[in-house]
Amino acid sequence: MGDLLFIDDIKPGMKSWTAIVTVQEKLNVGSAPSTPTKWQKFIFVDSNGSKVQGVLFDYAIQKMGPKLKLYKKYRISNAEVRAAAERFQLDGLKLQWIISTKTVVEEIDEADSSVLPFHFDFTAYKDLPPYVDMKYETVDVIGIVIHASAIIPIHKDSRELLVQKFWLVNEEMNPILLSLWNEFTENQGKSITDLKDKHPVLICRRLNVVMYNGIALSTRNDSVILVNPPVREANQLKHWAARNEKSFAGLFRITCMLNKVSWVKA
């Protein structure tokens, strides 16, 4: 166990260090067709609000991945610190911690972790049009789920893709369609569907904006879907939803008529 440091004090090549961090994001496992290597990325944040990207590869995903749970606090020691190539950076984070089976990861029990001080910058639904079909530009949004469709298989370029669609709404009262693709349907999609009657809050990060019966949102490989996250903005939206829940069904029907959506009864 090394010196206790903040994220910004930990530099590439440093050894004998320890940091206390919370898991803000846990991405789905990724891979590439050209290599058998698999990886899983995380975003850790410390008490100063500083962030760093964590990465697990191959066997470490199986061994260490289940230990690192969303919103939990950990004492991490002696991960390998590397500079992250620009194309692999999440949110412009220039450093990454490579967590192997030799990295010390210890969960810290907290007496009160009901609301975490994470900060997000959301794009308003009315401000989404300029981002349409901009492949390398993404948005972060927050919304209440007012409708969930079934998973649908789609055949494209000799591949079968899975998609699941959800309608989101926030205080703007202008519903928007969110499409989850492939592994998102199996992971986050299932969690959302199980909670659909309770109108869960979603914080969605790094989404693409597309045209599909109007402005819509779509996941990409590095997206994150946080379901009912314990943060202030989600709690505020949940309280707003409780006051306006009776209007959701009518709002959804009107939206479907306007957009001529064919899967209203899905």
Image (cartoon, grey):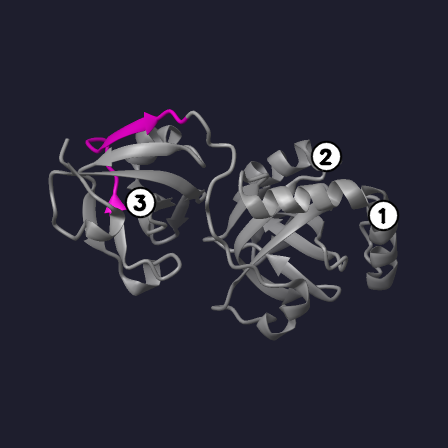
Provide the residue span drawn in magenta: 97-110
Earlier in the chain: of badge 1 and badge 3, it is 3
Name the residue nearer the viewer: 201 or 87. Answer: 201
Q: Residue at x 83, y 58 (%)?
A: 255
Alpha carbon separation for disc pair 1 and 2: 14 Å
Residue beneath disc 2 = 198
Q: How many marks?
A: 3
Q: Amino acid at mark 2?
A: Lys
Label 2's element? helix
Q: Position of residue 79 (x, y in %)?
A: 20, 40
Identify the disc placed on residue 247: 1
- Residue 146, percent from left and from top: 75, 45
Q: For the residues labelled 1 and 2, say whether their Cβ atoms are less than 8 Å apart.
A: no
Residue 60 in magenta stretch: no
Residue 261: percent from left, percent from top: 81, 57
Q: Badge 3 is on which residue? A: 55
Q: Earlier in the sequence, mark 1 or mark 2?
A: 2
Q: Give the distance between the C-alpha atoms of the residues marked 3 and 2, in whole angstroms.
A: 33 Å
Choose between 92 and 158: the one closer to the eye: 92
Against 65, is 180 above or below? below
Residue 186 marker: none
Along the horizontal axis of the image, is 232 left or right of 192?
left
Question: Which of the 4 image quadrants contains residue 192?
Answer: top right
Assess whether residue 101 is covered by the magenta stretch: yes
- The residue furthest bottom is 130
Tell me which label, 3 or 2, sits earlier in the chain: 3
Classify mark 1: helix, strand or loop: helix
